[in-house]
Image (cartoon, rainbow, N blue to C red):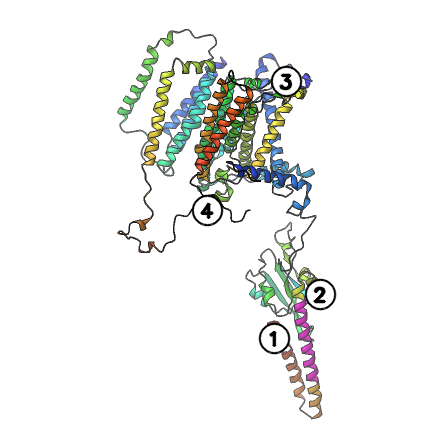
Amino acid sequence: MPNKITFCLTVVFTLSAAVAAIRLRNPVHCALSAALAFAGLAVAFLGLDAEFIAFAQILVYVGAISILSIFAVLLTRGTEVEPTAAVFSRSWITGIAITLGTAAAILVPIFSSSILYKIAPAVASAPVQMIGTELMTHYLLPMEVMGLLLTSALIGAVVIAMSDRPEKKDDSSHPSVTRYPSAESKPATKRDLTTV
Amino acid sequence: MKFNFQGAGIVRGFVETARNFLGSYYDPERLTTVEYPERKLALPENVRTVPFLVYDHDMSGLRCTACKICEQECPAACIKIIKDTVKKSDYLGKSQFQPQVFDIDIAVCMSCGICAEVCPFDSIKMDQVYELATQDRFAPLILHKEQLGKSNAYFHAIHPTDAVETDSLRDEAKRKAETKAAADAAAKAAAAVKPKPEISTTANSQSVGTSATANVEKAVAT
Amino acid sequence: MNSLDQIFVTLKQWLLSYVPTDFQPVGSALLSIVAIIAVFGTAFALTTILERKGLGRIQNRPGPNRVGPCGFLQPMADAVKMLTKEDIVPYAADKVLHYLAPIVLTVPIWLAFAVLPFGRNMSAIELDASIVFFFAVGSASELAVFMAGWSSHNKYSLIGAMRGIAQMISYEVPLVLSTVPVLMLSGTLNLNEIVNAQSGFSFGVGQWNVFTPWGAAGFLLFMIAATAESNRAPFDLPEGESEIIAGFLTEYSGFKYALFFLGEYLGLFAVTGLAVTLFLGGWNAPLAFLNVVPSWLWFFAKFGALIAVFIWARGTVPRLRFDQLLNFAWKFIVPLTLVNIAVAGIWYFSSDHLAYAVRWLICAGIFLGFYELLGRFLSLKRAPRTYRYAE
């Protein structure tokens, strides 16, 4: 009975945080609500005695992913201006269709899997050692593929960030284009600060 | 002894601070600060905080003549002077006003020292007291004539160079005034041989007074 | 002597015997919470005054010595001052987040103490993956720093928060990676078992991880990353007062400011406790015959020594520039932690083939060689630094 109460509280908490993440106007508030929802999910994992997954959830999602989304929000647009457009898209039929499609894509494999008919073990805890061994033997290929995917994403991000070459500051190297006639009289801008 | 591996500078820094840490317990000479209320450092001569008024001998010998130059020059307008109604004779023997009220609001005073620079009577000088904190923001921070007045000996104690110079100038002025007065008296005595109209004696005494003031001003200017 | 070692455990059981059976789990948790808050709250007060006195001595001045005997009541005076100050919230601030930020910083950090073993049988909760729990609750402080900086609606606060997040994310990587060799060699994520793995004695000296080459290197890397993670000098850029007033703390006053202060010190204490547990043998005695001293005394002795090292470092090293800070993390510390993991692997697999001294020298040589080469490589393009005023 206490477990059910805890579960219900967790569900209410997580769902309301998730709804707030969609409904709130300020993108920073949305990102923080998403972090709350992630934390609620971690509590749900704890209720299932999946300690390691719960802590990993907090470590990765609350600690890293939500910070990442906050960075993205702050770097892309001004958070000072409240958006005037409605939060809900006008093309709500498309939205509902996408939602249903996503839900189906998740639910169909769940309900068609054999895991539903397995009898749950008496002690549900999975020791960390077992998780590690399974990852390194049975699930080695998926893990490697995921690692490769993340690495390529990382390299792609670096490439995108690097493509912004800094424009040349030294105009005196192009004597034909003298946009600043007093360029020669200017003091050298490049100063080696380490040898002051 | 100098090792040059990566990060050697950091290690040397750690050694240095450890030596400071231990050394400050064994060698009090290392301590660069003074524990203030118990020990006070001697102030340099030119330190100035708020103004004070110099008197000779006692309060009745206040040098201030309530000329109000300092009141007008004060950029912060923190000086308030009200002239007394009766005149007193100053050290040159000339009769001058004295201030009935001389207040300085040291909450407003910014210690610029302009009042001391403009004073032609060497009356207002800059003090060196610095423990001026009070419990109340208003009344205790307005210093009256009684609190401001301090002896010439005190002036000598805090600004020896300035005080000696001022005294010599004042002695000079006094000597000049005395010789002038003596010369005037001699001239008067000589004039008294020849009979003259009665009115001239009063005119003479006035000229003595003005010349004495001019002498003092000349002394200040030099 | 065993009774003295277990005095707190016995005390807790004696107190619990007066509690009805149904409420004993709750009572046990409450007692642990009270003990942790009391001990580390006191440690916080003591550390603030000792830090100020220590820093003073490092700078050749006596430090605070006015309030109470030798100034030791200064924390009380500070507390009264903090609590009686006006709590100012900026008009343009995001009121809710501004209010929540100090709470979000402080509360998770208290949780981190739950898994630390303070002595034999003295950890508040027993978890299989306690070190993951420790890092998980520690990661909430980044969110708190961001909330504080963003909600204040002040450009200095925001700059401080962005600096803080970038720094904490960068240094969380080496912080976790430097613990990996310990987890590899002891084969567990449970802090109690990690301490037990270091409980043996060889030649009368404790088998602590710090006495192995990978342990010594990991300990140093962990300490550097921990300094940065707890925003302490020389990595105190988020609140670099000479540049951005007080960083994300700019708009905080009174009790909220005190909470931030408390949270920062608690973060330092937690990560120091973890360093003691992972590398310095936890509550184990350093020499075999010193086992008579109670285990919790050993833990707090090591804890205090490490705090002193942090204060020493604060008094020694000047603050880094921001690009130096990130370069130091990503180009120097992270590669070194990766090399250290490889060294730990070599150490593990050579145990059957080589004598102890030989493999010690080989492993230390590999790490030190890499350290020296990487350092020289990174400083290749730089001219030697000359100082105008020093030396």
* Residue at which label 4 appears: A195
Q: What residue type is labelled 1?
A: Lys
x and y, in percent, of residue C99 in the image = 49, 34
- The overriding secondary structure of the stretch rendered in magenta is helix
Label 1 in the same subunit as label 3:
no
Figure quadrant of the C terminus of chain B: bottom right
Task: Give how far apart the Cα atoms at labels 1 and 2 are.
Answer: 26 Å
* Residue at which label 3 appears: C9
Q: Which amino acid does label 4 sit on?
A: Thr
Residue A26 seen by the camera:
no
* Residue at which label 1 appears: B218
- Secondary structure at badge 4 equals helix
Check the image and report above or below for B123 versus B179: above
* Residue at which label 2 appears: B59
Q: Residue at x 64, y 14 (%)?
A: C17
Label 3 in the same subunit as label 2:
no
Residue C317 seen by the camera:
yes
Question: Which chain hosts label 3?
Answer: C
Q: Which amino acid does label 2 sit on?
A: Met
Question: Which chain hosts label 1?
Answer: B
Task: Give how far apart the Cα atoms at labels 1 and 3 are.
Answer: 92 Å
Marks 4 and 2 close (CB-CB < 8 Å): no
**Which stretch is magenta?**
B164-185
Label 4 in the same subunit as label 2:
no
Front residue of B55 and A22: B55
Q: Quadrant of residue B47?
A: bottom right
Front residue of A83 and A64: A64
Q: Of tags 3 and 2, which is closer to the observer?
A: 3
Q: How crowded is mark 1: few (under 14 residues within 10 Å), some or many (20 or more)?
A: few
Along the horizontal axis of the image, is C116 left or right of B27? left
Task: Give how far apart the Cα atoms at labels 3 and 4 are.
Answer: 60 Å
